[in-house]
Image (cartoon, helix red, strand yellow):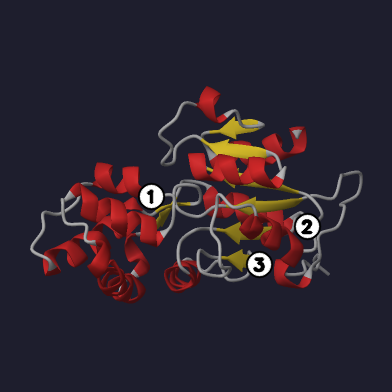
Amino acid sequence: MGACVIPPRQRPCEAMRGETPIGLVFDLDGTLVDSAPAITAVANEFLATLNLAPLTIQETVSFIGGGSPQFVGLMLKSREAFDAARFDQNFASFSAIYRAASPELNQPFPGAEAALRGLAERGHAIALCTNKPAAPTQRIVEALGWDDLFGAVIAGDTLPVKKPNPAPLREAARRIGCLSVLFFGDSETDAATAKAAGEPFVLFTEGYRKSSVEELAPAAHFSHYEQLRGLIESL
């Protein structure tokens, strides 16, 4: 008979033979998935309702990281259209478009799925911790067929606070039963989250960061998911 692999949702964080028990928590946008094209499409559909100029991909990338409210605020300010009195209404309009958007423009970075599945098959407990709202997060996870990969999904509206507050990362660790985790991300927000939680930060260098690798000071960094298994073993 072949080996029986228990899906991550059913398996607590535990030491594999000869290894230290540690969970693996991943950011989504800019870390596992290149979501900038999809977010740009949503943003431009929203901006069109206000007769405002569309965003470029570069502008979108510069606004990603702090969650949807921050993104909408930065986007409107970039078009000199921010109005605090109308922000809730504008944010609700943006959110409705975001929830309804097709996930097809969200593409995994090369090798990401194979790396995740390899880690799951080796018994690692894996979680997702993102500032993206739950509805679009779940649509992406389902569209990519990743439902079985994550023992927990903490989105931007799962808790009252978002990254870089450490609570979402700590909650992800708690839900997969881990006292300690490696946190994989691509941005200043992710680096600050790991630091606040007292957990090691591993930087994916091909995402949406604005700072240098040296400024983010990760415990380790990688540029392709083929490097991930060896990197985790070295840590």
Task: Residue at 86%, 57% (x, y): give it.
Answer: 14
Q: Tell me, yes or no, if residue 187 can be seen here.
A: no
Separation of residues labelled 1 and 2 (CA atoms) = 32 Å
Quadrant, the C terminus = top right
What residue is disc 2 on? 123
What residue is disc 3 on? 152
Q: Secondary structure at mark 1?
A: loop
Q: Give the label, 3 or 1, closer to the camera.
A: 1
Separation of residues labelled 3 and 2 (CA atoms) = 15 Å
Task: Residue at 80%, 66% (x, y): give it.
Answer: 2
What residue is disc 1 on? 64
Quadrant, the N terminus = bottom right
Q: Secondary structure at mark 2?
A: loop
> Disc 1 marks which amino acid?
Ile
Q: Earlier in the sequence, mark 1 or mark 2?
A: 1
Decide: few, some or many residues near mark 3? Use Cα within 10 Å; few <14, some 14-19, many ≥20: many
Res 83 label: none
